[in-house]
Amino acid sequence: MIPIVLAYDDPRAPQLVVEALETGLTIVFPTDTIYGIGGNPWDDVALEKVRRLKGRAIDQPFTLHLASLADLEAFAALDERRRAWVESLFPGPYTLLLPARVGAPISAVRNGTIGVRVPNHPFFARVMAPLGRPLFGTSVNPHGLPPLADVDDIIDHFPSIDLILTGPIGGGPSDILDMTADPPRAVRGTLPPQLRMPGGESPDPT
């Protein structure tokens, strides 16, 4: 079956996203970094399909993609200090590891920690925000290969995807920042200046 492909700002997009989330379908969506593939974070059918496509282990968590900071606090526990850090970074090209709240989807939680994104992208502002629903997601790429940015390449590698929403994307994956550490540390990428220790030192030399 060939995926449905349309622009994220197509008038049909919101309804198709809702239908996908309600029926366990997989969605490719644009972000401010790269394309993501995911769906309903509580739907075992969608989760298993993406795991199979990507070759991911069942205990490897996905990232929860949210439309706003208000949505984030339903799934991640923020004290005053963490809230200030998060507000300085989101929306933006970061994946933040934070303490998970009870009720957060287990597909995005590991050892009490949840990975969250609030992309600075109009798809989330215009489509996902009015829906008030999160997406689980991971990068669109065969295991061990770079993320795919061309729709034809995505279909060639993942022809069983159900819905592809096209739109502008950035040039590379998000930086991953561990906000459960004090001070925070960069797991992938660079620690932003506002999270560095006084004197300009990074708490994590990697």
Image (tube, rainbow, N blue to C red):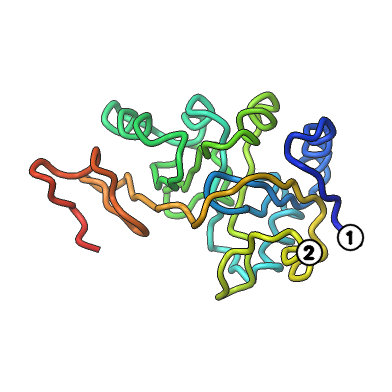
Residue 155: which numbered mark, if any?
2
For the point 8% across and 44% down, the residue is: 199
**Image location of residue 157, percent across then percent down:** 74, 70
How far apart marks 2 and 1 lie (CA) works out to 8 Å
Residue 40 as seen in the image, left or right of residue 11: left
Q: Quadrant of residue 139?
A: bottom right
- Tag 2 near tag 1, CB within 8 Å: yes
> The residue tagged with tag 2: helix, strand or loop?
helix
For the point 57% across and 74% down, the residue is: 145
Q: Looking at this rendering, what residue extends furthest in the right direction?
A: 1
Residue type highlighted by circle 2: Ile
Bin the neighbour count of mark 1 within 10 Å (Cα to Cα): few under 14, some 14-19, many 20 and up: few
For the point 72% across and 47% down, the residue is: 166
Up/down of 199 relative to 131, above or below:
below
Up/down of 45 relative to 67, above or below:
below
Residue 2: which numbered mark, if any?
1
Residue 147 as seen in the image, left or right of residue 77: right
Residue type highlighted by circle 1: Ile
Q: Looking at this rendering, what residue extends furthest in the left direction?
A: 199
**Image location of residue 41, percent across then percent down:** 65, 46
Q: Quadrant of the N terminus?
A: bottom right
Q: Nearer the viewer, residue 110 or 62?
A: 62
